[in-house]
Amino acid sequence: MSRTVDPISAPNQHLAGNILNPSSSPALSLHAAKGRNSSGRTWKVRPQKRASSLVTSNRANARSKSWEAKQKQRLLNKEIKEAQAELIRDRIEEKRAKRERRAENERRRMENEYENAKRSMQTLNVKRLGNTIRAMNKKQLRQIKKTRMNTKTGVVEFVGAYEK
């Protein structure tokens, strides 16, 4: 079949018809086999003026929505955003409560540890401290604790003798 129609001369030349079905129009069917694209995109039948021309060429897509449909869509989007915000707020509140509960448990644990250690502790005599420590074995030395004020909770706690 010989070519009787002028070839596509300009890069954005517009041809009427459905480019996805070249046999729909005789002009398109002539230009359908125009050779191989330099880009290698063989599925491109002809260049488009704008990408939007692909979208609006479909009459269903080109139709504008009615005011009621737009309002309904806006209301739906608003409800979705509110639900998402509520979920985020719940998650933040949950994390905050968990953090508070953890801090409270830590404080109580320290207090209990301090009370238990206070009951079972043995004070070292300052005059004989050197002799006493020299006589202790490793395990006993590890048990030596000193008191310190916890700056976060404000509670007196026992810490190891060599801790900073």
Image (cartoon, rainbow, N blue to C red):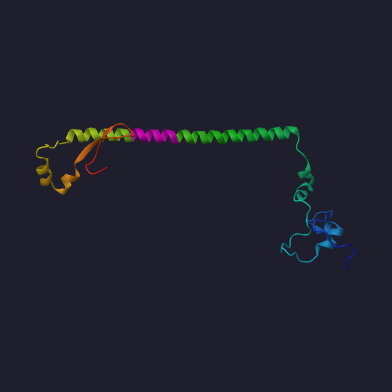
Q: Quadrant of residue 159?
A: top left
Residue 106 location in percent, x, y?
32, 36
- Magenta span dominant secondary structure: helix
**Outermost residue toward the right in this view:** 4
**17 vs 40: above or below:** above
Quarter occupied by the C terminus: top left
Q: Nearer the viewer, residue 123 or 83?
A: 123
Residue 9 location in percent, x, y?
84, 61
**159 vs 27: above or below:** above
**Outermost residue toward the bottom in this view:** 1
x 78%, y 41%: residue: 63
Q: How many numbered tags mark residues here?
A: 0
Residue 98 location in percent, x, y?
41, 35
x 57%, y 34%: residue: 83
x 66%, y 32%: residue: 75
x 40%, y 35%: residue: 99
- Part of the protein shown in magenta: 95-105
Q: Nearer the viewer, residue 28 or 150?
A: 150
Find out whether residue 99 is within the magenta segment: yes
Quarter occupied by the N terminus: bottom right
Find out whether residue 74 is within the magenta segment: no
Q: Nearer the viewer, residue 105 or 151?
A: 151
User: In the image, 115: left or right of 34?
Assistant: left
